[in-house]
Amino acid sequence: MKHVPLLLILLWFCNCSTDKEKMLAENDSILAQGVTQVTKIEVSGNAKAYTFDVTIESPDTGCDQYADWWEVVDLEGHLVHRRILDHSHVKEQPFMRSGENIVIAENKEVYVRMHMNNSGYAKKAQKGSVENGFQATELDVEFAKDLEKAAPLPDGCAF
């Protein structure tokens, strides 16, 4: 009976270790999949020149794997704006980059999504409008996939 508290403590540590190992394995899986997401969007300006401040989380490892752009796409799959990211952000996560002079109606619903150089579009995106704000959503990675070939495109990775 006097070893029961010790046994309970050992079981607790074992469970914590298992949870930690599971979490690390999930993180490794996310890195391997190149998962990335837009986590926050702040908009300023006016209809002829909005600025989108887009916060991004991406499993950048260097020029071999990095978020190479974010874009605004209308619900029909037409490119509204693309912000090229010229380098990886390995030590800066999450990070925010702005896109300026975005011409869009205040009430026009759009998606804001990320693209990885080695795996394509992310499933996790944001949907909304300047007027009503943005919320997390999931997109089929095949949605408007042809935009991967539309200009502007990155011309390399600085670091």
Image (cartoon, helix red, strand yellow):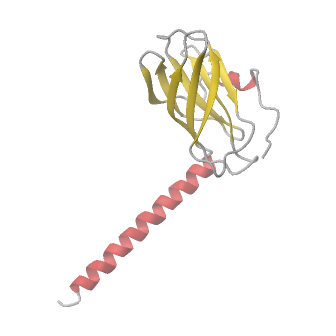
- Judging depth in this view, the residue of 10 and 40 nearest the camera is 40
Image coords of residue 25 (percent x, y): 52, 59
Q: Position of residue 99 (x, y in %)?
A: 64, 25
Picture coordinates of residue 127 (x, y %)?
48, 24
* Point 29% across, 79% down: residue: 9
Q: Which residue is drawn at 74% across and 20% down?
A: 150
Q: How many labels does the image show?
A: 0
Residue 13: horizontal and vertical position, in percent? 36, 75
* In this view, 150 is above or below 159: above
Q: Is residue 31 above or below residue 75?
A: below
Residue at image coords 50%, 27%:
42
- Relative to 27, is 149 on the left or the right? right
Choose top left, top right, bottom left or bottom right for residue 67: top right
Q: In this view, does 7 lie above or below 71?
A: below
Query: Is 159 left or right of 34, judged from the image as shown?
Result: right
> Would residue 69 appear left or right of 42 to someone viewing this image?
right
**Quadrant of the rendering where the N terminus is positioned:** bottom left
At 63% from the left edge and 51% from the top edge, which residue is drawn?
Answer: 32
Nearest the camera: 61 or 29?
Answer: 61
